[in-house]
Amino acid sequence: QGKFTLLRDTRTDGSFLVHHFLSFYLRAGCKVCFVALLQSFSHYNIVAQKLGVNLTAAKERGQLVFLEGLGSCLDVVFGKEELAEEQEAKQPHPLQFVRTTSSSSGTASDLRALLDFVRASLVPVDGDAWQGRVLLLDELGILLSLGAAPVAVLDFVHYCRVAVCSRLQGNIVVLVHSDEDSEDEENRLLVTSLCHHSDLILWAEGLATGFCKDVHGQLKIIRRTSLQPGGERDTQQLYQYKIQERNVTFFARGMSAAVL
Amino acid sequence: LVSTEEDKYGVYSHLLFKYFLAEGIVCGHDLFVASAKELPTNILKELPAPLLDNCRNEAGEEAATVPSEDDSMQIAWRYQNFPKMEASPSTSSRFGHYYDISKTMSSELIQSVKCHSFFLPEEPSLQPTIKMHDTNCGYARLLQSIQKIIYQEGFDGSHPQKKQKNVLRIAIQSLGSMLWDDDICCTDNPKDTHSLTKFLYVLRGLLRKSLSACVITVPAHLIQNKAIMERVTNLSDVVVGLESFIGSERETNPLYKDYHGLIHVHQIPRLNCLICDVSDTKDLAFRLKRKQFTIERLHLPPDLSDAVSRSSKQELAAAAKLLSSGCGAGAGGKKHLDF
């Protein structure tokens, strides 16, 4: 409860972790707000069905609030002039920072609409009996590509933590890409800062020796016990994995089925 | 969204661009051609002519591998069990059509499909009505034009009664170059780093919501700020890089003597499933023959020369190391295989 989990991938695609957490929390009966910036709804739906969860049904019963970045940015960019104005008076579109000018008073206002959307979707409503609240975000670096400043993104994440982790005792799971020899300074700043503030880091890395058919990568699990009172050192576990059609198998390093 | 990183002089990426359009015409898809440097009608005039069925066998035989030998191997018998080395990745399945690049496509065939075009210098310079802050005017107008065509022609399902469904093939040339009024190719600190990435994101949104496919070419070798190229890679579904040997030291390298360039597959789509189908072949090279452009698996020829000097062996080894820097789903690990 109240934990911030960072999903990180390097030299490989860590989105299988996102699919896992999505189906995991939905099966556990939590209310999930999924800000899906990278792919369309049907992609997540098809994969979730393979993992045994129906996203459309979850949306209909109110368990899942899905923001499809690709689709809704079209509304923002190509929306009709008159409709947009009257809608904004009522409720600004979560992705409106793509459209509006960055105000001189500060960059925090850029992502405010997105924050309000997240807060509104997870606020407890009388009559719902969901076990917990979860915010899932795929993928944070896209906010940078769309023009938000890294400080604005960090502020957004901070306010989300206040709203979701502290006040609602919910969890947050965020995916970021990171590459060692990346020259994207803004992304690096984002990832480093988030690493320092996460309670749990799941780091999917491609193998250092190159592509392998049987071992798709290794997963480093870092539990930030140093942040808790008691001040112990972070614990770290390392597993290698192979992604299959419907699940992912984990094994200790060097113990892949192909080798044994 | 397929992003092609252009080779240094744009020769081969332009060829792939034309192949994409030609395939669209032969399949009967509608086309949308956008360019800032060449008139779309001129591009359409230069498309390669499709090969008819009886010619295809001829072309197939040309590219066929060496006829098989029946006698079993005496010395290298361990290799008997391995599948025969095939130069082209899949010769059995028929996918797409073949073209003869020495001939151009007939104008009747071109006119059989609807071709929409966007040529930046000739577009009226109206202020675009779409709302994207800080975005380059050229990109905004292009987006508006694409969205208008998608909506009007019903590719996004908005006019269901109109006609039977068709696919729109969008091809955009040299996105990010100076001709699109974007200065990411000139300076390390462009005044607007987000125009191209915002454009690609909205374009991908349009593609997901309609029956369309898009190929763009990007002059990646000119873009100074590598962070932008990384973001472009993250925002695309497929990224293919072309590296031609023209003018580089690899032209004289004996390893590459049969080929004109290398193809690097940086990323393949991982859509609708947990894993992607990564092929075994990582090292692809291309060759431009008089009538055909072929992509083949790059293989080292047997080292048969007696007096091979040490320096050339090292060169070959270095080139071979560079070959296997795999695609995004794999990893690039040159350092750990030094032995």
Image (cartoon, helix red, strand yellow):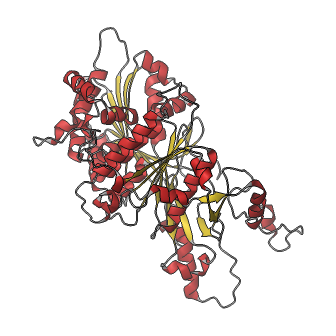
Residue B78 as seen in the image, left or right of residue A153? right
Q: Nearer the viewer, residue B25 or B275?
A: B25
Residue A190 as seen in the image, left or right of residue B62? left
Give the residue at the far right of this rendering: B71
Evaluate whether residue B315 shows in this view. no
Compared to residue A19, the image places residue B312 above or below, namely: below
Q: Position of residue A187 (x, y in %)?
A: 30, 51
Screen quadrant of the C terminus of chain B: bottom right
Compared to residue A21, the image places residue B178 above or below, namely: below
Give the residue at the far left of this rendering: A105
Residue B188 as seen in the image, left or right of residue B332? left
Give the residue at the far front of this rendering: B108
Give the residue at the far bottom of this rendering: B307
Which image quadrant for residue B64?
Answer: bottom right
Q: Position of residue B319 (x, y in %)?
A: 54, 74
Compared to residue A88, the image places residue B88 above or below, namely: below
Compared to residue B123, the image places residue A225 above or below, namely: above
Q: Nearer the viewer, residue A68 or A155?
A: A68
Evaluate whether residue B30 shows in this view. yes
